[in-house]
Amino acid sequence: MVIGLEIHVKLKSETGLFCACANEQDFMTMKPNTAVCPVCTGQPGALPVLQLEPVQKALLLARALHCSLNNPSQFDRKSYFYPDLPTGYQITQYFTPYAVKGQLAFFSEDYSQEYSVALREAHMEIDSGKTIHDGENAFVDFNRSGTPLVEVVTEPDFRSADEVINFLKELQRIVRYNDIGDADMEKGQLRVDVNLSVRQA
């Protein structure tokens, strides 16, 4: 197996990435659509304003992952249309991510072997809302819309599921220890996309 990961880390900040809405950490207990504003719901004329604390948390994560910082860096619009994306685009860093060329070392479960994985980039972006399906009905909750994320993209350096698991445990420890985020997977604060190749060499 050849495996690469795309990991979304929700940042633990008081506000969203581009608005002053409360960045709640547990959306399961919130009343739907109560932490929203004209910016994160994409109202006409509402302008995003980059907030300081999420950027500081993102920079801390980049340093903890031994990344180089891009200067300058910029945000881009990634357009797609889905009910829980009120603006019709996601604000992300497609062309010039804020951090590149990182590295994370970790150990096997029994600490008998050390591994190292190269990180291609880390970029900031906003989260979408959430669509809840109930039979033939669909409901949209925008409380999560605009919350700050860092997406960490690895190189395809993994060769087993155990390596992936131990890497993610180490990343989770780093995020929690540095108070960058809670990284609770059950609450969607750490989400992982797996790119997997099983082609024979």
Image (cartoon, grey):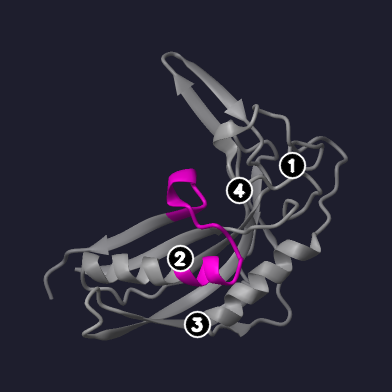
Q: Earlier in the sequence, mark 4 or mark 1?
A: 1
Q: Which residues are magenta?
A: 172-191
159 relative to 133, above or below: below
Q: Are marks 4 and 1 in contact (CB under 8 Å)?
A: no
Residue identified by numbered label 3: 102
How much space separates mark 1 and mark 3, taking CA atoms? Answer: 31 Å
Question: Percent x, y for residue 26?
Answer: 58, 42
| Residue displayed at 48% across by 52% down | 184
Residue identified by numbered label 2: 172
Say if residue 81 shows up in the picture.
no
Whether residue 40 appears in magenta in the rendering, the answer is: no
Q: Residue lying farthest left?
A: 200
Disc 4 secondary structure class = loop
Q: In the figure, is residue 138 to the left or right of 12?
A: left
Say which quarter of the image contains residue 192.
Answer: bottom left
Whether residue 189 appears in magenta in the rendering, the answer is: yes
Q: In the figure, is residue 167 to the left or right of 13?
A: left
Q: Are marks 4 and 3 in contact (CB under 8 Å)?
A: no
Q: Earlier in the sequence, mark 2 or mark 3?
A: 3
Q: Earlier in the sequence, mark 2 or mark 1?
A: 1
Which labelled disc corresponds to residue 40?
Answer: 1
Disc 3 secondary structure class = strand
Which labelled disc corresponds to residue 127?
Answer: 4
